[in-house]
Image (cartoon, rainbow, N blue to C red):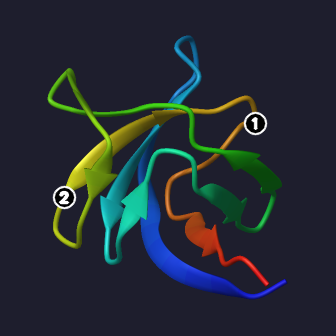
Amino acid sequence: MSEQLVGSVSHYFNKAGVIAIEMTGDLAVGDTIHVTGHLTDFTEMVGSMQIEHEQVTKVKPGDSVGIKVAGKAREGDDVYRVLPD
């Protein structure tokens, strides 16, 4: 399973279960992400993304995006897009 670094977690909103990501790569709804860090390691599919409370289907480098996740993340965690084999 190969992966591509697409960003890093800038904030984790505990009550909402949302991670804010500063994007360095492309990502789309339906992609699978792998969030990893010192205490973090989970993989899940991107169900929805928002920029400034507006739903988006694709993001690009330079965007700051919010993604709802089931796992707990921490600031500075790396976000990878899992590439299809």
Query: SS for tag 1?
Result: loop
| Residue 77 drawn at (x, y percent) | 59, 63
Residue 15's disc is none
Quadrant assignment for the C terminus: bottom right
Q: Which image quarter: residue 63?
A: bottom left
Where is 10 relative to 79, above or below? Answer: above
Question: Mark 1 Cα within 10 Å, few/some/many (few <14, many 20+)?
Answer: some
- Residue under label 1, please give it: 71
Looking at the rendered structure, the kind of residue marked 2 is Asp
Where is 83 relative to 63, above or below? Answer: below
| Residue 16 drawn at (x, y percent) | 52, 14
- Residue under label 2, please give it: 63
Query: SS for tag 2?
Result: loop
Q: Residue at x 71, y 67 (%)?
A: 37
Where is 50 relative to 21, above or below? Answer: above
User: Disc 2, disc 1: CB below 8 Å?
Assistant: no
Looking at the rendered structure, the kind of residue marked 1 is Gly
Q: Is residue 71 left or right of residue 22?
A: right
| Residue 30 drawn at (x, y percent) | 56, 47
In the image, farthest residue toward the front: 85
Q: Residue at x 66, y 56 (%)?
A: 32
Q: Is residue 68 left or right of residue 59?
A: right
Spatial separation of the CA atoms under disc 2 and disc 1:
22 Å
Where is 45 relative to 67, above or below? Answer: below
Quadrant assignment for the N terminus: bottom right
